[in-house]
Image (cartoon, grey):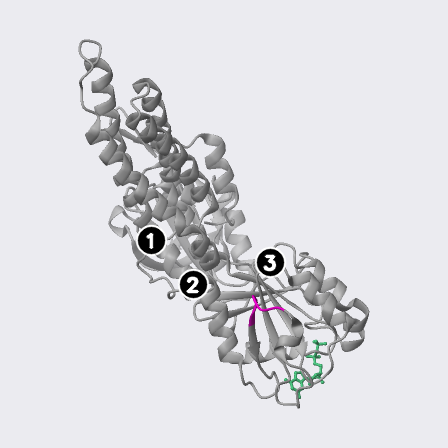
Amino acid sequence: MFLFFGVLIMERCIATVSTMTGEAGIGIVRMSGKGCWDVGKKVFVPAFGQVTEADHRKMKYGHIMEDDQLVDEVMICFMKAPNTYTREDMVEIYTHGGPMSVKKVYRLLLEKGAVPAERGEFTKRAFLNGRIDLSQAEAVKDLVSAKTDMAYKASLNQLEGGLQKEITGHRQKLLNVLSTIEYAINFTEDDDTYDVAPAIVEGRQVLEALLKMRSSANRGKIVKEGIRTVIVGKPNVGKSSILNALLRENRAIVTDVAGTTRDVIEEMLDLGGIALRLMDTAGIRETEDVVEAIGVERSLQSLQGADLVLAVFDVSQALDEEDREVLDHIRDKNAIILLNKEDLAPVWEPQDLGLDHIDLVTLSAETGTGLEDLEQKILDRFFDGGLPSAESLMITNERHAHLLDEAIEALDRAILDLEAAISLELCEVDVRSAWLKLGEITGETADDDVLNKIFSDFCIGK
Ligand code: GDP
């Protein structure tokens, strides 16, 4: 929908199944765009009365019919532009949740004039029609995929416009800086004494705020994506026992990863609102035979790209060559050393490892001692000084972090040049560039390629 000489022009009617396919209580098929009420009225026979404009956002009960053939018994909701998710006319049909009901209703809508929606097209329309900005649209995707309380709250905050408001405020200030510079450029044509100090002060304020925001990105990434963790250690030191013990203590996160084509399978657990993603099944789920066969080697391969390495040693057995090899591999990694089987008589001391700069946790997967200590150490490692509060603004998106970097670089250069009284024209270019980069976060200055890329990452139906 967009305004054309004061008239609302709506995009073509799109339809999609918005719920997961499978056996479920209900399934939702929805439409948005020009003529979707007509398509809805063609297939829906209300149990009482007719569908009228007065039905806006009201649930109606009735049947979906294909000519005189019953397709499903449904609830339906007709919604009138502009007070809808997309700001266009919309219809949502609540069918029975089985794959057949949903599919048949969807097919029927296509037959009656709707076209299949592209990925993220509903949210894209909400963005293009100005209901949400780009950072809020991205938050919708994050909210749908959030697996922990913290990830959920961070995306909800962004969806509510937390980031949008902040960025918009900074862009406004950059406009002030720009106008001061532009004024100075014109002014100095006659007289070179125009004072740019206010622009420097305001520019610095924005720069500091952007740097602060940028510094939250590491935590933000962990909040959103979780801590990619690898457990390494030679066979029989207790890797799978530790994993199981951690899973017993914490809530396991149900994911749709297992059994898919991804070659790395992960166990996920919720550690105080943060996802601990334990990568790789080598030594985790396989039988001991396979563990022997795959051994340390396979686990070591997964060290690449890990945020955290948990290196397990058995204190009840003498350290050997294989243990030393594990140590060699974790020396330069973000690692915590786990001294397992502390319930058995230890035959060596932590200092025998010859590493004094790596955190150690003594524990027993068998009795559970030391597990809490381990959990706390993991959280401290990433959130020293406490977990972020739900309200604090965090950069959780790599695209935003990258754009912030570019804005910071340009603004920093502009301020240094202003202070050194170097060409005002160059300063203007840099401040404008920072303003444009920030605008890409909210979408005001993002081009079609960026938009297409962002929305093509959405799940179907959103
Ligand atoms: P992995 O090959 O490293 O995954 O080791 P497992 O978790 O399969 O454990 C090997 C053996 O050590 C099993 O028999 C476990 O029951 C035992 N084990 C693991 N952790 C402990 C522990 O903390 N104390 C004791 N006493 N035995 C343990």
Do the residues bearing badges 1 and 2 touch, measured as CB atoms within 8 Å?
no
Q: Which residue is mark 2?
A: 383
Q: Which residue is mark 1?
A: 393
Front tag of 3 and 1: 3
> In the displayed structure, would residue 424 be above or below residue 386?
above
> Residue visible at 43% across and 71% down?
272
**Distance of mark 1 from mark 2, alpha carbons?**
15 Å
Residue 365 vs residue 29, the one in the foreground: 365
Q: Main secondary structure of the magenta part?
A: loop
Nearer-N-terminus badge (3/1) = 3
Do the residues bearing badges 3 and 1 touch, measured as CB atoms within 8 Å?
no
| 388 relative position to 106: left or right | left
- Looking at the rendering, the quadrant in which ligand 1 lies is bottom right
Tell me residue 136's x, y (percent): 36, 47
Tell me residue 302's x, y (percent): 67, 59
| 131 relative position to 218: left or right | left
The image quadrant that residue 192 belongs to is: top left
| Amino acid type at image mark 1 | Leu
| Amino acid type at image mark 2 | Phe
Residue 106 vs residue 421, the one in the foreground: 421
Nearer-N-terminus badge (1/2) = 2
**Distance of mark 3 from mark 1, alpha carbons?**
25 Å
Q: Residue 306 bears which disc, if any?
A: 3
- The magenta region covers 355-359
